[in-house]
């Protein structure tokens, strides 16, 4: 599974980032938004999905509702 995070996400990244930003609706730095988007995209791949809009939305909502967003903030020194 380690190789999954090596998949080139570049062509999908900006669209996924836009979706994540819309779903979270919380002010955050570009740095944090980039980190969260990468994590969400990796999660989609790990569970066998792709970067379809509904997949990104669903995982983003789960990150928010299950507290993963706060854990990511803490893991990265409390960046906002």
Image (cartoon, rainbow, N blue to C red):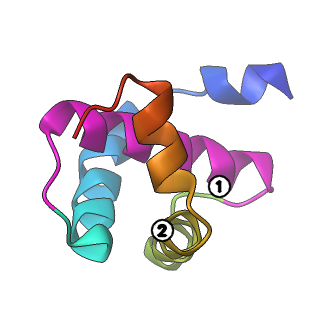
Q: Is the magenta stretch mostly helix, strand or loop?
A: helix
- Per the image, the residue denoted by label 2 is 64
Q: Residue 44 carries which label?
A: 1
Residue ID at (41%, 24%): 76
Q: Give how far across and how far down residue 57 sits, in percent.
A: 46, 74
**How packed is label 2: few (under 14 Cα within 10 Å), some, or many (20 or more)?**
few
Dot 1 or dot 2: first in sequence order is: 1
Q: Can residue 56 be seen in this view?
A: yes
Q: Give how far across and how far down residue 46 sits, in percent.
A: 77, 46
Residue ID at (23%, 62%): 21
Tell me: residue 60, above or below residue 9.
below
- Which of the 4 image quadrants contains residue 78? top left
The answer to whether residue 63 is left or right of residue 36 is right
Identify the image quadrant of the C terminus: top left
**How packed is label 1: few (under 14 Cα within 10 Å), some, or many (20 or more)?**
some
**How far is the residue under mark 1 from the one under mark 2?**
15 Å
Residue ID at (80%, 56%): 48
Tell me: residue 26, above or below residue 15.
below
Q: What stretch is highlighted in magenta?
A: 27-49
Q: Nearer the viewer, residue 14 or 70?
A: 70
């Amino acid at each position: 599974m380690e190789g999954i995070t090596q998949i080139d996400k570049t062509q999908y990244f900006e669209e996924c980032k836009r979706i994540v930003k819309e779903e979270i609706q919380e002010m955050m730095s570009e740095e944090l938004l980039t980190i969260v988007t990468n994590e969400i995209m990796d999660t989609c791949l790990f569970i066998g999905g792709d970067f379809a809009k509904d997949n990104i939305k669903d995982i983003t909502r789960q990150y928010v509702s299950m507290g993963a967003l706060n854990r990511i903030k803490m893991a990265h020194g409390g960046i906002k």
